[in-house]
Image (cartoon, rainbow, N blue to C red):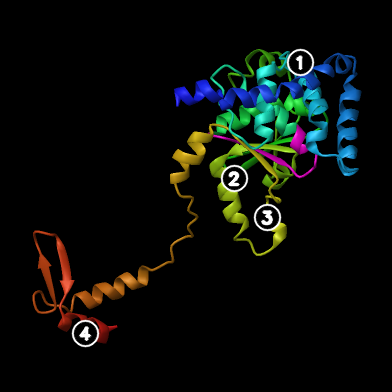
């Protein structure tokens, strides 16, 4: 393969280089968006939605949308997306797998395609590997989406939350801004129904919760009882873990066992009528017991 690579070049490098024109377009909007007021950022989101309704595609508005997210991130998190993170965002938007090393900012990269695809109003799911990350990322990245006029939800442990910058926020801003990437600051997590959390523009959660909610929704008697809406776009964090390792673990919903106490008394009464060797035989070595034909018939008649 090394010889073929030398002759034809590395296909991965070629693909990344092909994205450079899009990166250049995104960077062209940076200076203009730096001059926007907070209200203008949200107005731009409304403009994007209108342009989509008029027939433009997500790819048409991608450069402007990514540049807008970068500006919102710079203002709220004091973190500006680097070009490599813009590349990661484009790759995720295209439905491909982006491999990013720890510390390269994959959480920040995901905000780009999440915002872009949420503009259609059909919802976006960001699937993480545990409840901690789901809550942390909603509180942390929710600042960006809120600055752009979008809502953010979170699904964990049979519960729902929505990001609310004013909810129970007494001195949490400095703590979140300082340690937002390391811990969850719960002051911004307003409890909600799962349906409300799923109705948000962007919803964080674990693969298990999304999966179980899907199963439950297929067991309800009325559509009004369903919590999820139609699926649109999803970003899977730790894709190798969730789609390979976790995929081998089945999701099972089981009902309560029927009350069968009276049956135990019935079986105990029948068994007292049986005689060893003639009605049943015991294998001491295998630790098993089996009915003989005579014993089987006796049980049937007794019942």
The label nearer to you, 1 versus 2, is: 1
Residue that appears at 51% across and 40% down: 243
Relative to 217, is 272 above or below?
Answer: below
In the picture, residue 274 is in which quadrant? bottom left
- Mark 4 near mark 3, Cβ–Cβ under 8 Å? no
Residue 270 location, x and y as percent?
Answer: 23, 78
For marks 1 and 4 on the same chain, the one whose residue lies earlier in the sequence? 1
Residue 210 numbered mark, or none: 2
Q: Is mark 1 on a helix, strand or loop?
A: helix
Instruction: Give the extent of the magenta segment.
Output: 116-129
For the residues labelled 1 and 3, say whether their Cβ atoms are less than 8 Å apart. Answer: no
Farthest residue toward the front?
Answer: 7
| For marks 4 and 3 on the same chain, the one whose residue lies earlier in the sequence | 3
Which of the two labelled residues, at mark 2 and mark 4, occupies the earlier sequence position? Answer: 2
The answer to which of marks 2 and 3 sits earlier in the sequence is 2
Residue 297 is marked as 4
Tag 2 or tag 1, which sits nearer the N-term? 1
Judge depth for marks 1 and 4 and give the one in front.
1
Q: Which of marks 1 and 3 is in front?
A: 1
Which sits in the foreground, 57 or 147? 57
Question: Residue placed at 79% from the left, 17% from the top?
Answer: 27
Which of labels 2 and 3 is toward the front? Answer: 2
Question: How far apart are the two marked residues, 1 and 4, measured between alpha carbons?
Answer: 81 Å
Q: Residue 226 carries which label?
A: 3
| Marks 1/3: CA–CA distance | 38 Å
What whole-number distance in Å separates the C-alpha atoms at marks 4 and 3?
50 Å
Q: Which residue does the numbered mark 1 point to in the structure image?
A: 74
Query: 61 or 149, which is in the foreground?
Result: 61
């Amino acid at each position: 393969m090394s010889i073929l690579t030398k002759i034809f070049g590395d296909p991965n490098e070629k693909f990344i280089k092909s994205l450079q024109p899009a990166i250049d377009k995104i960077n062209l909007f940076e200076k203009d968006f730096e001059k926007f007021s907070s209200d203008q950022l949200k107005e731009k989101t409304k403009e994007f939605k209108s342009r989509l309704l008029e027939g433009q595609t997500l790819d048409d508005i991608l450069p402007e949308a990514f540049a807008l997210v970068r500006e919102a991130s710079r203002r709220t998190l004091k973190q500006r997306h680097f070009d490599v993170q813009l590349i990661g965002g484009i790759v995720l938007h295209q439905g491909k797998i982006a491999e990013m090393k720890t510390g390269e900012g994959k959480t920040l990269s995901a905000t780009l395609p999440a915002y872009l695809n949420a503009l259609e109003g059909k919802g976006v799911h960001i699937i993480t590997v545990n409840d901690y990350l789901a809550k942390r990322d909603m509180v942390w990245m929710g600042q960006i989406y809120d600055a752009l006029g979008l809502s953010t939800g979170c699904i964990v442990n049979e519960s729902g939350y929505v990001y609310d910058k004013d909810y129970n926020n007494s001195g949490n801003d400095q703590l979140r801004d300082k340690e937002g990437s390391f811990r969850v600051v719960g002051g911004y997590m307003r409890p909600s129904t799962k349906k409300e959390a799923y109705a948000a523009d962007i919803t964080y959660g674990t693969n298990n919760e999304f999966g179980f909610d899907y199963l439950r929704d297929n067991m309800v008697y009325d559509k009004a009882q369903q919590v999820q809406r139609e699926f649109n776009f999803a970003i899977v964090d730790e894709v190798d873990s969730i789609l390979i390792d976790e995929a081998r673990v089945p999701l099972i919903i089981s009902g309560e066992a029927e009350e069968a106490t009276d049956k135990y008394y019935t079986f105990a009464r029948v068994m007292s009528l049986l005689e060893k060797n003639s009605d049943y035989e015991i294998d001491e070595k295998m630790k098993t017991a089996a009915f003989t034909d005579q014993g089987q018939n006796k049980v049937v008649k007794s019942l």
